[in-house]
Image (cartoon, rainbow, N blue to C red):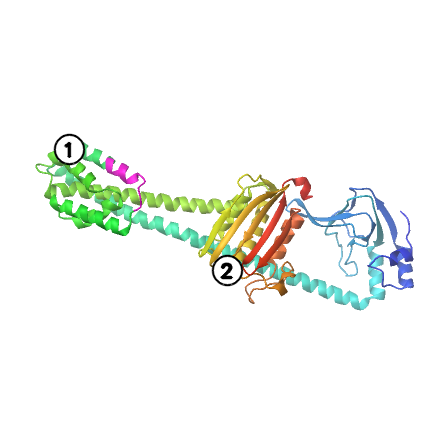
Amino acid sequence: MSRTTADELRTLFLFEALDDEQLTWLADRGDVRTFDAGAVVYREGEPAEALWTLLRGGLTLSRTIGGDDVLITSSTHRGAYAGATRAYVDEPDTLYGTTVVTTEASAFFRLAAGDFATFMRRWHPLAVHLLDGLYVGVRTSEATLRQHEHLARLGTLSATLAHELNNPAAAAVRATEQLRDRVAGMRHKLGMIATGPIDRSAIADLVTAQERAVELAAKSRRRLTAVEEADLEDALVDRLDELGVAASVDLAPVFVAAGLGVDWLDELAGSVGDGLGGAAGGAALEGPLRWMAYTVETENLMDEIEEATTRISTLVAAVKQYSFMDSASRQEVDLHTGLDSTVVMLGHKLAGVRVERDYDLGLPLVPAYGAELNQVWTNLIDNAADAMTGTGRLVLRTSRDADDAVVEVQDQGPGIPEAAQARVFDAFFTTKDPGRGSGLGLDSARRIVEQRHGGTLTFTTGADGTTFRVTLPLSEARQG
């Protein structure tokens, strides 16, 4: 521990405007503390006993969030200060809100919190009141706006998720109701067949034909045009009429939708006809055909239910991927999974947007806080959709640049106005209409990318659109 002089203090930007009396007062009460590289100057949560001003060396400023040390900033700027910066306010038991660690051999001018408070109240009483009011006002405003931003984002995502879940859920309910009717019809027709003129030996052939119909209906087939489908229905109606089936107009669309045509009908009539109590025609054939119709409709409805429930499971999985539920806060992250889950979460807003993916599938995993990166993708993709007013082409591109992973979000909007470009990342600045944005989205995204992950967030813009570019170090060591 040593002393400094008024002349040395005058070279620091924090004290350069003070007069000799004030500088001497500070020099007499403060002292110089030196630290080796990697030393802890003070820790978060300890009593805020002093104001620390950097004389030489370098420092990092961090906070603990969710059990992890989060880098706030780093500096080698002579005169950088931290610690009891608000000691002049009458707040009992004030604690350090951050941790300061040296990045190289460093020296600090240390001024006890009580002396700093005395100095401020003696020589700058008006500034004390103004700074305190400004600090409280800004902190309250920022907290309110960030809370509003988070709630608005949560509301948007919740509405999107509710909309996306409602469609498959409603489809599953509708298909289940229809399935119940078809199964009841199958039971009824099976009873009629069993008590009708059909020979017992033909029932086995009918069951075989039923399995054959299910097999044919399950096979992938070329999607028919409206004209082709109408022609096949007409051909099947004609053949059913020839066989004397009265319900030809009702049955033909069901069989065509399942991919069953005239050849299948003739095969069925030939296989079971001898056991229908005579010729394979008229009312005798209509019962087995209706049973077949219920069968293929039942299969189609079960396919609809499976598709709907699979869609619900996919959405739930996307939510888990998006929020990184059941996962460690920091882990090896697949950037493509995060981008895709974000697109799913914003699906309702992107309904009119053509999303194109240009992914480097060889991109390695990135050490990251996955849920926080998804906040970045959400802000960038949401802004892109707003820029295109809900329609256009959105390109999500990934690549590798040396030891960095690169993610680009490109829209076809009108571009960012030149007058606004310098302030895009400023907190509370927005180009959106009043009430549509708080101006905290890109500020938050930049903090997550740069301070949380040691990366960069930049953009290029023009009349043909805007591209935001995120670079993330591929090694945890380079992320700091």
Please identify the residue farthest to the top as the structure is shown. Answer: 201
Q: Within 10 Å of the Cα at label 1, are there few (<14), some (14-19), or many (20+) other Cα atoms? A: some
Residue 421 vertical position relative to residue 324 in the rendered view, above or below: below
Position of 431 with respect to 184 (left or right) is right
Which residue is rendered at x = 61% and y = 59% of the image? Answer: 440
Asked whether 11 falls inside the magenta stretch, the response is no
Q: Let me know if residue 216 appears in the view.
A: yes
> Are the residues at dot 2 and dot 1 in contact (C-beta closer than 8 Å)?
no
User: How far across and down, in percent of the image, does residue 361 sit?
Assistant: 53, 40
- In the foreground, 38 or 364: 364
Range of residues picked out in magenta: 212-223
Q: Secondary structure at mark 2?
A: loop
Q: Let me know if residue 329 appears in the view.
A: no
User: How far across and down, in percent of the image, does residue 111 sit?
Assistant: 84, 54
Q: Quadrant of residue 297?
A: top left
Which residue is rendered at x = 84% and y = 54% of the image? Answer: 112
- In the foreground, 60 or 216: 216
Position of 402 with respect to 6 (left or right) is left
Q: Quadrant of the C terminus?
A: top right
Residue occupied by mark 1: 202
User: How far across and down, in percent of the image, does residue 248 sit?
Assistant: 16, 48
Residue 354 vertical position relative to residue 209 in the rendered view, above or below: below
Residue 33 vertical position relative to residue 387 in the rendered view, above or below: above
Q: Secondary structure at mark 1?
A: helix
Q: Amino acid at mark 1?
A: Ala
Q: Quadrant of residue 418?
A: bottom right
Q: Amino acid at mark 2?
A: Met
Residue occupied by mark 2: 388
Residue 240 vertical position relative to residue 201 in the rendered view, above or below: below
Q: CA distance from mark 2 to mark 1?
A: 64 Å
Please identify the residue farthest to the bottom as the structure is shown. Answer: 126
Going from N to C along the chain, the mark reached first, 2 or 1, is 1
